[in-house]
Amino acid sequence: MMDDFDLPAFEPGWVWLVGAGPGDPGLLTLYALHALRHADVVVYDALVDRRCLAQAGPSARLEFAGKRGGRPSPTQPDISRRLIELARAGNRVLRLKGGDPFVFGRGGEEALALVEAGVKFRLVPGITAGVAGLAYAGIPATHRESNAAVAFVTGHTAGGDVPDDLDWQGLAKGVPVIVFYMALGHMREIAGRLMTAGRDGGEPVAVISKATTAEQRVLVSTLAVCAADVAEAQIEPPALMVVGEVVRLRASLDWFTPLQAGMKGPKSEGA
């Protein structure tokens, strides 16, 4: 299939920063699959599904570089230095990241480090969880009858706290649908800030765990009680929090849950 059109050569000494999508290997782009099959070294994140890694060439070396909260893990400067080292040794280096490298993936930091080091790179976008995860939960990110805008917001800063530099009033009042990444540990505070800023406590909320995988779970609640419901249900990370009226559409559009009973597959690496 990929022979039907030209794909760029993956040259030695280059680093490709590639998004693997949120889990389902079927969401890999053709560029991502091409890179996997030609890389000498694959430096991958914790959220990259093993089935995606299985697409790597037989001689490729896999190096884990995942960062997970509460566990020993390499620092961002360590990862950037390793990419530079591998590229300067003449390797075709694939930096494989969950979702999209430039959407809360710190791909910009790695790209800037490569620029500073004079290492050539290519960026390959991936399908971000905030789009694919909602789709697999049967929740449109936008719907003509409910919202003309959607916001993607990180649930915590690099220091692990809820972002203080956000205009919470503007976010609560001006954006009908808000998708929070990595919000599981701060859901109570996030919900409280939104309600303090004027958001209705009865507004629907969905929490999507392990989106697009066979282990996907979706909990539907309301802003006022979502944190308690998530704790009771023991929802596990990685998880998205979706706030807005589009959540109500899941009742009609949930296409994925009926398929899960027949799905089998390994868990994501590092899960």
Image: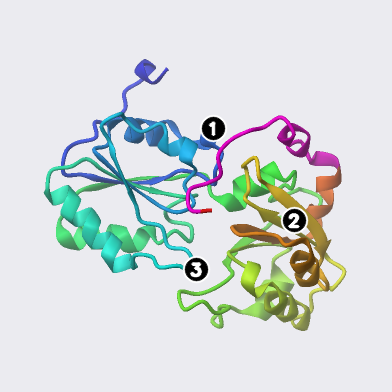
Determine crowd level at label 2: few under 14, some 14-19, many 20+ residues with C-alpha closer than 10 A.
some
Q: Left or right: where does residue 123 sit relative to residue 29?
A: left
Residue bearing mark 1:
26
Residue at 81% from the left image edge and 50% from the top image edge: 145
> From where the camera sits, is residue 209 visible?
yes
Residue 183 in the figure: left or right of residue 95 = right
Count of numbered circles in the view: 3
What residue did someone put label 2 on? Answer: 147
Under mark 1, the amino acid is Gly
Which numbered disc covers residue 69? 3
Q: Quadrant of residue 225?
A: bottom right
Q: CA distance from mark 2 to mark 3?
A: 33 Å
What is the magenta range? 252-270
Magenta includes 266? yes
Residue at 16% across, 60% down? 117
**SS for tag 3?**
loop
Q: Quadrant of residue 194?
A: bottom right
In the displayed structure, would residue 256 be above or below residue 101? above
